[in-house]
Image: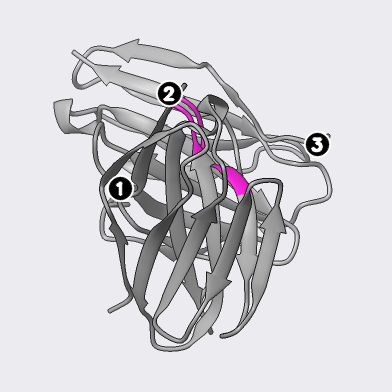
Amino acid sequence: EPEVTQTPSHQVTQMGQEVILRCVPISNHLYFYWYRQILGQKVEFLVSFYNNEISEKSEIFDDQFSVERPDGSNFTLKIRSTKLEDSAMYFCASSFDQFGAFFGQGTRLTVV
Amino acid sequence: EDQVTQSPEALRLQEGESSSLNCSYTVSGLRGLFWYRQDPGKGPEFLFTLYSAGEEKEKERLKATLTKKESFLHITAPKPEDSATYLCAVQDQGNTGKLIFGQGTTLQVKP
């Protein structure tokens, strides 16, 4: 069964450092998303991406965040100058038709 | 503003004891309502999509229903392996695929 793959599963970084979270969406999907979940809180939308452009972004997705689809299979989330409050689970998701989404297993980001 | 509220926050059942989880939503125009299952430390796993009031979907011991203001996830004769957090999410018309999630109901089924 096709699935969304995320790497790494756990990332520990020093405050102020840059991190890149990587995702391989389901191969025939066209719409890509990043969500995050702070421990004990709701899953929150960060950004949607289609046709090599950001379609929508939330207030959380400020200038320290960026997304890229560097090739035909990968989708990345870059966080510049990480803060303690960026510690969370980050989920990549994809969909074929901009309706619903299938999620990866997440990357746990710990900023120390 | 789109909003999703789930109740109860936590639910403990004995194996075989049926119950229902509630998801109340406010959305400008509903495109779809989604139920996901989330195990600890894992990503949300898709269960159901509901499109319009009156619709029902079933999968094994789970049945999801939808009205104009809320959705229910009915669990019939649950087993310990049904223990998880169940998430409800809505998508409104005209947006870019963004899902708005509720805070989830954590279900524990004891043998």
Q: Position of residue A45 (x, y in %)?
A: 39, 54
**Residue B85 occupies quadrant:** top left
Q: Residue at x 49, y 82 (%)?
A: B67
Q: Amino acid at mark 2?
A: Gly
- Disc 1 vs disc 2: Cβ atoms closer than 8 Å? no
Neighbours of disc 1 within 10 Å: few (<14), some (14-19), many (20+): some
Considering the numbered disc 1 on the image, is that residue within a helix, a strand or a loop? loop
Q: Position of residue A67 (x, y in %)?
A: 50, 44
User: Which of the chains bears the disc numbered 3?
Assistant: A
Q: Is residue A46 left or right of residue B103?
A: right
Residue B17 appears in the picture as rendered: yes
- Tag 3 residue: A2
Q: Amino acid at mark 1?
A: Lys
User: Which of the chains bears the disc numbered 1?
Assistant: A
- Tag 2 residue: B41
Neighbours of disc 2 within 10 Å: few (<14), some (14-19), many (20+): few
Q: CA distance from mark 3 to mark 1?
A: 26 Å
